[in-house]
Image (spheres, helix red, strand yellow):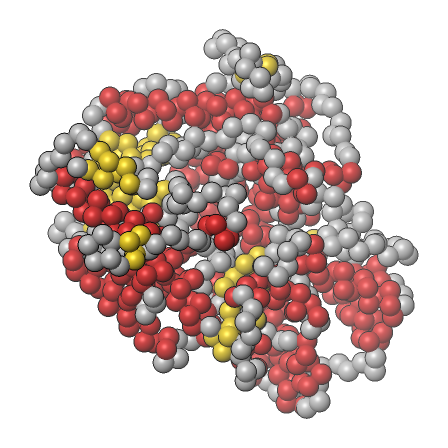
Amino acid sequence: MKSIWRRVHQNSNSNRASTNANIQVSPNERAMLGLFLAKIQQIDPDVLVGHDIHGFDLDVLLGRFTATKVPFWSKIGRLKRNQVPKSSGKFGTSDKSPSCGRLVCDIKISAKELIRCKSYDFKELVSVILNNERNDLLPEDIPVKLRKTDTLMSMIWENRMDAIYNLQIMYELNILPLAYQITCICGNVLSRTLLGGRSERNEFLLLHAFSKKNYILPDKSYNQKHIHTTEHEEENDEIAPTQTQATQSTQKQGASKKRSKGRKKPAYPGGLVLEPKKGFYDKFILLLDFNSLYPSIIQEYNICFTTIAREMKKSVIEGEELLPDVPESGLEFGILPTEIKRLVERRRQVKKLLKTVTEGSELYLQYDIRQKALKLTANSMYGCLGFSHSRFYAKPLAALVTGKGREILMKTKDLASNLGLDVIYGDTDSIMINTNCDDWNEVRKIGTKVKQEVNKLYKMIEIDIDGIFKSMLLLKKKKYAAGMILDRKPDGTFVEKREMKGLDIVRRDWSDLAKDAGNYVLGEILSAKSRDVIVENIHDYLRNLKDQIDNDQVDQSKYEIHKSLTKNPEEYPDKKSLPHVTVALRLKTQGRRVAVGDTISYVICDDSSKLAATQRAYHLEELTKSTSLKIDKQYYLSSQIHPLVSRLCDPIEGTDATFIAESLGLDPTQYKSATNHHGGDDPNVSVLMTDEERFKEDPLNCSQCKQDYKMNHVRNALRLFIREKQHKYYNCWLKTSRTRTYVNNVIVAT
């Protein structure tokens, strides 16, 4: 396949150098579309490759075929038909697809399954996968470029390069061979595999397995909601491969029934997340992870449709449901655990073969694609139990699997605690242990000890050392950053990689400017420097960043914020408060295509109006073309950089939101309340208060100087004083009596 791509790439380069490109001119649109169909019939391709073919290209082509009354439109496929299919945004079944008889490889759909990306538009995929820059061709620029020969030729060449980029991305991601391997494993149809729905693959795999055992399966029930469920929604709803979101599909199902009433609670409890011991750790942290926990649980306890009654018993407590009983140990192995075991063993065999061949060879690539296909299929098997639109949806079985997962995690935590270890966090299938140790070999011994003790308890469930963190910043549930040790060099130094989860830095709705600041701060915190040096470096960096922003030394693209549309822009109830929706509506009026799932980029500008920041959002192209718009620097300092950096620095002594605000040139008095509350809500502020009551302040008169002081200032001073004394007390510098005085809900030691 690599050799095929090399030939395509060489041909594209040679054609670029040639000035004798074969360009055919058509007198009108109808003739051009007819020529397009004639070319397809002449070439007769087996696979059509493109970006967002199902979501955009096919709809546009069919619409223009109908509008211009082009005959023989069905030549786009291999099935002769007269009636044009109705536009539905995505052609789900083969008999309705206009390209019936040809495979459609939509790289947008495939990329969503195979890689994680900020957005999946074509420009972003070209940048991330191919490391190339693609120039966007705007609709308003097309009439201008058609007027001159040089700009017309440039547009034709860019269009040709888009076709080359599509093909290259397909090869880079190995989309076709991977889809073929998955189809062979599951026994479904290749055209459906390319649509990306995992649920249907699992259905076919289990259908074949049950049929071999002479089971008669009930027909799949369809209703109105099932019909309108697309493969893309299935992909997002399914739990696999991330086990920590075991109830996401049931949440989405509840929300889809009545959007106006909000999201319903999960149909059954998901994975267990232990309460984290927040703070910064500069000793080795041990990360232990269960290998494919949910598939292993299904095998360990023989959980299957054929072994467990699919009814949840009602508990004595109202509203609570009891989990089904685990099958007896002597019962015959069920279909579901058997299939999962077969997939796991096949992958193990392929990985052994992978070690016997030269890395980078054609055979190595084939084995690697096969083991990835087996991994994707095995990890998604649990998803069919918890996905409500699946033929094999079984809420009792899914609840039993997650229930056993919670039980196993708690047992592992208790076991580690009984060994005298400090478990600081745990999430679904992993635990983190503070070893309070700097010795690498000792940490490995601790991990091996825990691993052996846990693995003794089970036959199919296995825990392993997933990594060792040199330092870690644990902020809250599902939010942490750590320096992961990849390797230890002969001289005793370590090769490290930063690992982040849930932080603002990794989210799309923060600008690159704020993310860069967060990355620098995080690097300083996780470094081995002293606390004073870290704090000083952070403050200096923020001051320098403020100067760069004021002097317009920051690239405008750094200010872009990205947010995806979860529905059509017109369907949002409060459009003015959502900047990405406002920009999306404006783009639609300019003739741009905006649809569900698209990622909208925008910047907050100063447009000389007094509107809220959310109503001053513009696309970057609007900013570059306008002479009156300019970046709202104050917004990015106060609402982007400051909150992101403040959250990261919260556990660090020597700095707080006030000092950070001062370094950024902001008014520090506005952040004192946030500093003293540590991000919490003021207990004196009721949600039922009006704005007048909430912000009303009665001054406090000093009996000595006769001066009035605002209550908030007094309260803040008291809290700062108390925090200082508490810090000294816990460091054994100060002793206090048991008496306490309450002043405005603030405890003052006396």
The residue at the point 68 percent across, 76 percent down is: 139
The residue at the point 62 percent across, 16 percent down is: 311
The residue at the point 61 percent across, 66 percent down is: 583
The quadrant the N terminus occupies is bottom right
Nearer to the camera, 248 or 52: 248
Please give left or right for residue 495 compared with residue 119 in the image. Answer: left
Please give left or right for residue 275 compared with residue 247 in the image. Answer: left
Nearer to the camera, 410 or 658: 658
Q: Is residue 420 above or below residue 389?
A: above
Please indicate, yes or no, whether residue 327 appears anywhere in the rendered image. yes
Residue 594 percent across, percent down from the top left:
66, 63
State the count of labels.
Answer: 0
Residue 83 percent across, percent down from the top left:
89, 55
Residue 3 percent across, percent down from the top left:
52, 62
Q: Is residue 212 above or below residue 649?
A: above
Please indicate, yes or no, whether residue 204 appears anywhere in the rendered image. no
Q: Is residue 476 above or below residue 523?
A: above
Nearer to the camera, 176 or 268: 268
The quadrant the C terminus occupies is top left
Please give left or right for residue 65 compared with residue 507 in the image. Answer: right
